[in-house]
Amino acid sequence: MGIENPRDGGSRAGESLEELARLADTADIEIAGRTIQVRSSIDKRTYIGSGKVLEVAEQARRVDANLIVFDDSLSPAQGRNLQKQLGMRVLDRSELILGIFALRARTSVAKIQVELAQLQYELPRLARLWEHLSRLGGGIGTRGPGETQLEVDRRRVRDRIRALTARLKKVEEDTKIQRRGRKGTVTACIVGYTNTGKSSLFNRLTSAGVLEEDRLFATLDSTSRVLQLPDTRAMILSDTIGFIRKIPHQLIASFHATLEEAIDADLLLHVVDVSNPDAERDIEVVDRVLEDIGARPEEQIMVLNKIDLAEDLRLVGRLKGEGQDAVVTSALTGEGLNDLRERLRRFVKSREIEGEVRFPIWNEEIRAFLHREGEVSEERFGHKWTRVKVRMKPECFERLRKKGVEVSIDATG
Ligand SMILES: Nc1nc2c(ncn2[C@@H]2O[C@H](COP(=O)(O)OP(=O)(O)OP(=O)(O)O)[C@@H](O)[C@H]2O)c(=O)[nH]1
Ligand SMILES: [Mg+2]
């Protein structure tokens, strides 16, 4: 059940509902029917209009449904009212997404993050659950004991939320320390809408063997690998969780540790599925989530993936125009992967600076360091000194300086 705002124009509600059906399918829910109500505002009490509630109840009974899924987040009151008036279980988009995350979480961190998001979502809705149970119990829902039980439940949930938050904080601190260890290496993170082929590209580039699947939210954690580039350069590449329309904010908050990979990256690879006619709106959704989580990378490269499946070449052309120099790829056929590697190499190179280093002629160690870490453009050997012009990471110059080596950085870079 979805709502279409007439001012939105077009088929947004239809698209969103189509995606809701895919989500339901991922959660093994069978779709018996769909309804969209056109209205300019959401009803505070029942989300859809009260007349529509009766109609939906009737329609649901006709097709033998036992669950109604709403395409937006329902407020606690809306959920309560709808459940009462429809006389059957009600689920909203956020709960469905949370449920899928819970089904698919594999690593312990992902499990903690999902449980935390679920509890935070449920806390203000416990009353609804409790009313439901007390009605089933037949008559035991008298006010006194009911409220007491509710209070007990709320306290338990709050305690658990506190414990999970503390564990996540510890995880976040540990990964921060790990990340500090790789300071000096350029990092890139693959982001994008769910199911666009992020993990497939990651695997093709790094041979990491991350799970790829034609389902929503195959990936729920972050994986990082060193990526060797076409020359001696290297960078750290990460694959992470995908985004979706109307993503529950509880999820974004609790997945902070996982999303840190994207927040911290020097470069984002925004992967788009160009075989999807809704690609442009997916891009907007991803951009908004990136902004929400505070990811402000120095640079973003748009990767137009699944080109082997693309039918609408006008769409591809449009995206190429917008994304300036977007890279067109297929993780399936390998098309464009060399272009992508080359783009990554250029990015890493662009972060390096030019400088001149002077050291005693006998010091082979420094000379080897310069040839290993940088791109040497000129070497001059004098009586006592060797002078080398080299392009490399600022951190490398810093290391030499700390050893007392004479370094002068070319300001024109
Ligand atoms: N034809 C074709 N299929 C692709 C391509 N890239 C990925 N796929 C398929 O698309 C599906 C999703 O791929 P994933 O790599 O799991 O996508 P993802 O973006 O990591 O998805 P989530 O982790 O669920 O957000 C899989 O069935 C892949 O085999 C491509 O370039 N061409
Ligand atoms: Mg993935």
Image (cartoon, rainbow, N blue to C red):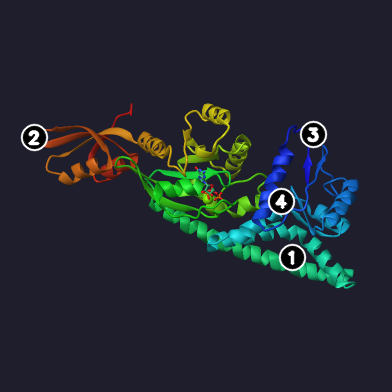
- As displayed, is residue 292 above or below residue 311? below
What residue appears at the point 15 percent right and 44 percent down from the top-left corner?
Answer: 363
* Pointer 1 local density, CA inside 10 Å: few below 14, some 14–19, many at least 20: some
- Could you tell me which secondary element the residue under label 3 belongs to? loop
- Which badge, 1 or 4, is on the more N-terminal residue? 4
Q: Amino acid at mark 4?
A: Arg
| Residue 154: assigned label | 1
Q: Amino acid at mark 1?
A: Arg
Q: CA distance from mark 2 to mark 3?
A: 82 Å
The residue at which mark 2 appears reads as 383
- Which badge, 2 or 4, is on the more N-terminal residue? 4
The mark closer to the camera, 2 or 1, is 1
Q: Is residue 312 left or right of residue 235?
A: right
* Pointer 2 local density, CA inside 10 Å: few below 14, some 14–19, many at least 20: few
The reply to whether dot 2 and dot 1 touch (C-beta < 8 Å) is no
- Which badge, 1 or 3, is on the more N-terminal residue? 3
The residue at which mark 4 appears reads as 93
- Could you tell me which secondary element the residue under label 1 belongs to? helix
